[in-house]
Image (tube, helix red, strand yellow):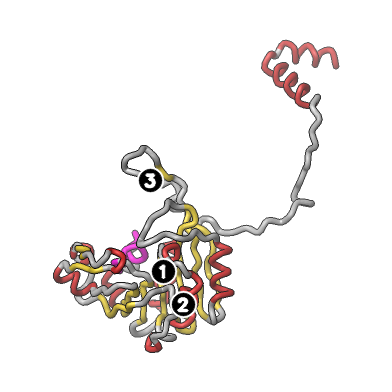
Amino acid sequence: MIIFIKNFIKKNKILYKYLFQVKKLLSYKFIFILANKFNSTKIQSYKADIEKWKSFNDLLVKKIKNTNGKLNFLNLGSGLGEVSAFTVFQNNELNYDLFFKKFNYYTLDYFALDLNKIQNNGDSVIRPDQQEKLINIDKNIFKEYPLNFHTGHIIHDLNIEFEKKEFFNFFDFVYCENVLEHVNNPSQVFDTFSKILKKNGIGYVSTPFSYPYHQDPEDYWRFTHKGLKFLLENKSKENFEIIFCGYSTEDRRKKLNLNDDLFSFWIESWFSVIIFKKL
């Protein structure tokens, strides 16, 4: 039987070559460290498939179905204050009309912003980081929004303590997307969440984990899911229940050009996400 096996192996050149390489490898002195599910260190898992916009959309829909009257919604670090990311989905449960019917829509940023005026006139905005340069905004961005959709704007630098007491315990939802990396004092943002969210209010933060450097006006940080949990649990003045914490990889292979003059691209884009409720 042994002779038969040896002859079979010699006739099969691929198998013979493979076994020869294994024999050669085993002739070296190695130390193998084997681990299995019985003796390996337990690694804490995290959710890496959060659908960040849909998850938030689902929470909005659930809230308005169980609430009479209007709720207060804040876009924190709003930029231009668009809402398309977390409203319009294929099932169209929360379109523009329904969103603005159910929510008083507020924005917050460090420069003045009147979205109703822009919607009507295509107005310009002055941002401090642009050295008093006027930024022209296309009014067509808001052409499908209802008239006078913007309830109010709060001018505030997120790096400093929030002291506008009229907005303490005021908001049912606070949305903060791709803002935290631009704030040089990110722990202060979570202190602001503590002050302005109502009891049972929902907070949302999405920020790059793996993404190219981008100034707006500056780009300081990248956060893991653990980093966001730490900022929420250790830097805020209230207790929170974490609903989702992990990563969105929906745009993971989206090709981003790093430099228009070079054929260089970034294709591994992850976003850290934390969604939480104030207790």
Quadrant (top left, top right, bottom left, bottom right) of the N terminus: top right
Q: Nearer the viewer, residue 182 or 83?
A: 182
- Residue at (49% x, 58% y) in the render: 222
Label located before the other in sequence (3 or 2): 2
Label located before the other in sequence (1 or 3): 1
- Residue at (33% x, 83% y) in the render: 70
- Indicate left or right for 8 with 163 as reference: right
Q: Residues within 10 Å of mark 3 (few under 14, many from 20)?
A: some
The picture places residue 239, in percent across and down from the top left corner, at 56, 80
Q: What stretch of residues is rendered in magenta? A: 80-90
- Residue at (76% x, 22% y) in the render: 24
Q: Nearer the viewer, residue 8 or 174?
A: 174
Q: Identity of the amino acid at label 1?
A: Cys
Marking on residue 176: 1
Q: Residue furthest front?
A: 131
Helix, strand or loop at disc 1?
strand
The answer, for residue 270, to whether it is visible in the render is yes
Helix, strand or loop at disc 2?
helix
- Indicate left or right for 67 with 125 as reference: right
Q: Residues within 10 Å of mark 2 (few under 14, many from 20)?
A: many
Q: Which residue is mark 2?
A: 193
Q: Which residue is mark 3?
A: 258
The answer, for residue 82, to whether it is visible in the render is no
